[in-house]
Image (tube, rainbow, N blue to C red):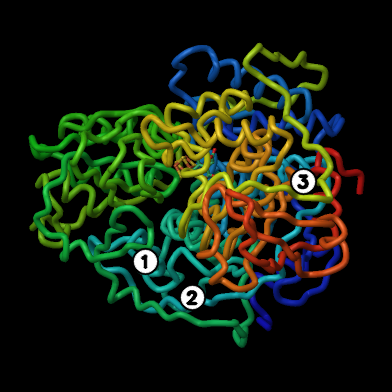
Amino acid sequence: MAKGTLVQKIIDAHYVSGEKIQGKPVAIRIDQTLTQDATGTMAYLELEAMGVDQVKTELSVSYVDHNMMQNGPENRNDHLYLQTVAADKGVIFSPPGNGICHQLHLERFGVPGKTLIGSDSHTPTGGGIGMMAIGAGGLDVALAMAGQPFRIPYPKVVGVKLTGKLSPWCAAKDVILKLLSIMTTKGNVGSIVEYFGDGVKTLTVPQRATITNMGAELGVTCSVFPSDEMTEKWLIQQNRAASYAPFAADDDAEYDRVIEISLDEIVPMAACPSSPDNIRTVAELRDMKVDQVLIGSCTNGGYRDLAMAASALKGRRISPDVTLAIAPGSRPVLEMLCRNGMLADLVAAGARILEVGCGPCIGQGQSPANDTVTCRTFNRNFAGRTGTKGDQSYLVSPETAVAVALTGKFTDPRELGIEYPDFTEPQEFWSDDELFQSPCKGTEIIRKPTIGEPPKNAPLPDELDGCVVIKVGDKITTDHIMPAGVHLKLRSNIPAYSKVVFECFTEAGKPSFAERASAIRDAGRHGVVVGRDSYGQGSSREHAAICPMYLGIKAVCALAIERIHRANLVNFGIVPLIFADPSDYDRISEGDTLKISGLRSQLAVGQNVNAELLSADGKSKGGIVFSHPLSQEDIDIILCGGRLNYRG
Ligand code: MIC
Ligand code: SF4
């Protein structure tokens, strides 16, 4: 087991209960929380449903950054609810236009050595300043705001040893893409990545934050850098020197696995369609025509990245064959670019300037044309996430994005023939904290008609009469289960949002998943979803559990289920079941029935659940044994139909 690691030190300092044995749940105290609007409305509705009067954390911040289009009243209704509920409950409110939660939290609130959970899977960005920052479902964040500890599997610590120094035009993004090529997006549940080695000190906090941000794509619990002189420099730039404290692993720290990456050998990389671990070098993609370039997001929307792009594009024009759009990560970043003239350089080069926020990263605008290539500095390229079916989305560094914007095709930025921009980072960043709104107890909470109630589940039935509503394959992401994009505005309205569950699998002229599942539910039966490996990757959106629950789904059977999604299933009373024999996956077909007698008692007494499989015409197809990854508390929660019914 890992000893003397930074991870172990932060866990020890926040330890509440549990066995410190790899894979066993340990409860840790949470110092800070963050929410964003797309997951936040449910989180605060849940907080209200729990009867919490004031949040109990050291700091909780509610950001509005995802749903900014305001096509129809829903988004603004959400914002008003979030603003007023935050004021009443003791939460700082960051209004729309202020910035993407992760970027802004790193700039204004993150503190080395503290714990943070956020209702967004890229919360681990905070690991860039030495925080243990973890993504979670909204209900878990609401529980943390209520003062409850948060449970993580006691981790396996993967030490990533960085040596050397990045060469010009090679970026932090290329480092995490390299790591994704090694660790992939599968099989890392329960691990935490800790960076160490001489190379660490060559990376600035924004570079480290790019790496910890996209660590989410590895499927690990979080990623952590030590807190050192670079961290201090960042906090001084942010005028927050008092928040600095050094944190590092012991010199003789032992890791469960060590991966070495030489920064000297890093070259420009790209994640190819449609998975962040489908990695090739940019040189291998040379000359492939590109139609669209987008720079921004919580991965690469900071000052350094945009200033680098502005400096490289200054006095040049983008290729007439591409469009280039820039979405700054925070208002301070945008304001600095405005004040120092760099925004003018970007505009003069031909860039389109988008609103500060998530924007196209979550399919809010800028969908690519059919059969064209889009090149983005973002962190996810799951199929269809851009809003275009059959999209070809490549993830690259801002350096590569600039090269592609100038040439209109995949170009290794080192071959541009331009000197790497040599800009000095400002001594102090521009910031105006007055735009954050402080809490004010007694504020009247504004609840417009599009703000629904979080639906509750019934206790788990003892006899499961489960119809397999859908059978899907490997690496099903929560974007597949619960699409965002144009549907994002339905996040506060579960009956409406439920209509698009698994929409990407609906065949023309055939009933949708929602229609099939609700027909089964209305006939008094139960619904079952069958997935394969790494089910529930990606976003933390608990809607990927709430909406299936609303449609009557009682169990999800898979070879492996990702951490946040599994926790969300438990929170909403859906049983996660793991095939004891992976080959049983092949025996199940859509329309089959999975009968489980005495499900409640089977869960309560053992690690295995025995089921009988029947074909659609009622013929027995034999037995299937499932295991389950549940703690006693998880079981108790599921038995009573989810967290909102649980009084543990
Ligand atoms: C994402 O990047 O997928 C999101 C949108 O930020 C999600 C949160 C959501 O679905 O609202 C995430 O990463 O958790
Ligand atoms: Fe927003 Fe994209 Fe970051 Fe998610 S990954 S928080 S949608 S910028």
Question: Can you say whether 626 is above or below 430 in the image?
Answer: below
Residue position for label 3: 144
Residue at mark 1: C-beta within 8 A of ligand 2: no
Mark 3 vs 1, N-terminal side: 3
Residue position for label 1: 175
Looking at the picture, tell me which residue is in the foreground, 150 or 622: 622
Question: Can you say whether 37 is above or below 268 in the image?
Answer: above
Report if residue 354 is visible in the image: yes
Mark 2 vs 1, N-terminal side: 2
The reply to whether callout 3 and callout 1 are in contact (CB within 8 Å) is no
As helix, strand or loop, the secondary structure at mark 1 comes to helix
Q: CA distance from mark 3 to mark 1?
A: 32 Å
As helix, strand or loop, the secondary structure at mark 3 comes to helix
As helix, strand or loop, the secondary structure at mark 2 comes to strand
Residue position for label 2: 160
Residue at the outermost bottom position: 252
Residue at the outermost right position: 647
**Quadrant position of residue 245:** bottom right
Label 1 crowd bin: few (<14), some (14–19), many (20+), radius 10 Å: many
Q: What percent of the width, then of the height, locates residue 44?
A: 72, 31
Question: Can you say whether 424 is above or below 451 in the image?
Answer: below
Q: What percent of the width, then of the height, locates residue 17?
A: 86, 65
Q: CA distance from mark 3 to mark 2?
A: 30 Å
